[in-house]
Amino acid sequence: MNYLNDLAADIEGWKREGRYRSIKVWESGSDTWMNLNGRKILQMSSNNYLGLTHHPKLKEAAIAAIEKYGVGSGSVRTITGTLDIHEQLEIELTRFKGTEAALVFQSGFTTNQGALSSILGADDVVISDELNHASIIDGIRLTKASRKIFAHKDMDQLEAVLKETQKHRKRVVVTDGVFSMDGDIAPLPEIVQLAEAYDAIVYVDDAHASGVLGKNGKGSTDHFGLNGRVHIQIGTLSKAIGAVGGYVAGAQLLKEHLIHTARPFLFSTSQPPAVAATCLAAIQVLQESADLVTRLWDNANGFRNDLQRLGFNTGASETPIIPIIVGDPAQTMRFSDRLLEEGIFAQGIVYPTVAMDKGRVRLIVTAQHTKDDLAFALNSLQKVGREFGLLS
């Protein structure tokens, strides 16, 4: 049997359904305006929320680290791969998050895989929001724990599951802080209250809340004033922080346990020194000033209001993630392509990432976008939206 025939059949099916995407090759670094096939394109799909990828302090830190340490760490963290710059980053993250300890992984995805597979055993149950990120889903699949799913942000259903799972050794309630496809915020106070009532552990993935929610971007726990009441906080260094990596923030005992059990930590070479230094500089920039976070929210709230005023369906968005719901997958991708013709990159997202009838173009507003940038985007969206019948 030629397995390539099966792969080709899958690809042809995606093309017929309008779900096939070719990877765009950009000719410039992550920025507000980027070069694509010789054109300047307004970037409206980047996770570079605060524009830190070009911040001078971060670039200086990366260059200095290369001069001091070279380009690689040489090993996994438990052998020779823990340099003092890695320790400094974890100390700074601990201060930033207000926890006992922090442990850095190579990505946000591997952080969830490593943490969930380590803390959950066969006698435990994990209780997960149905719209949690793929990294959470895959992390749960690596465990032998029982699994329960509650409807998105449905606190009555969560309580019912907590009641029926009392026999398990540990109950771990897992939620995104900000949901990546809809841009809505988890009802964390209610989750924490229920978890405390039923003696459950609260695990929050702040991938899209890191650098976005809370004082100076400290995350959803700080945003709701729940410091000390959320047991495990997952953060990313790959989005608003401007580089790459992920981390767990929580108890010192949790860190020590993960060092001995989390397989992505144990079997992956540590961050290059330049990356660790960049992340360290980014956290320091955030702690010095809230200006970038304030500008991010001013831009996002104003732009969302403008889209809604025009008549676009922005779903449940309440953060800088702003989807425009189109519906049909093929129509969604055509809408995205048409925006690109107008000079705007806004990625279409369709089934199976979202429901078949919930295809959307996901816009992400950043602190770097100027008023002129957003006005250009709004005019183009209005023009194309009318063409596609999304506006009256």
Image (cartoon, helix red, strand yellow):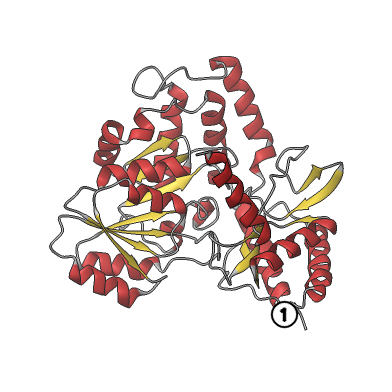
Q: Quadrant of residue 353?
A: bottom right
Alpha-carbon neighbours of circle 1 within 10 Å: few (<14), some, or many (≥20)?
Answer: some
Q: Where does the image place residue 255, in percent across and percent down from the top left?
A: 30, 38
**Does 261 sit left or right of 104 as displayed?**
left
Question: Quadrant where the C terminus lies?
Answer: bottom right
| Mark 1: amino acid | Gly
Q: Quadrant of residue 36?
A: top right
> On screen, 279 above or below 33?
above
* Residue occupying the point 75% across, 40% down: 26
Whether residue 200 is visible to the viewer of this picture, yes or no, is yes
Hey, which residue is sitting farthest left in the picture? 167
Where residue 343 appears, as percent x and y from the top left, is 83, 55
Q: Position of residue 204 (x, y in %)?
A: 38, 55
Residue at image mark 1: 311
Can you say whether 151 is above or below 139 in the image?
A: below
Given residues 245 and 213, the one toward you in this image is 245
Image check: 241 left or right of 37?
A: left
> At 62% from the left edge and 58% from the top edge, which residue is drawn?
294
Q: Residue furthest bottom?
A: 392
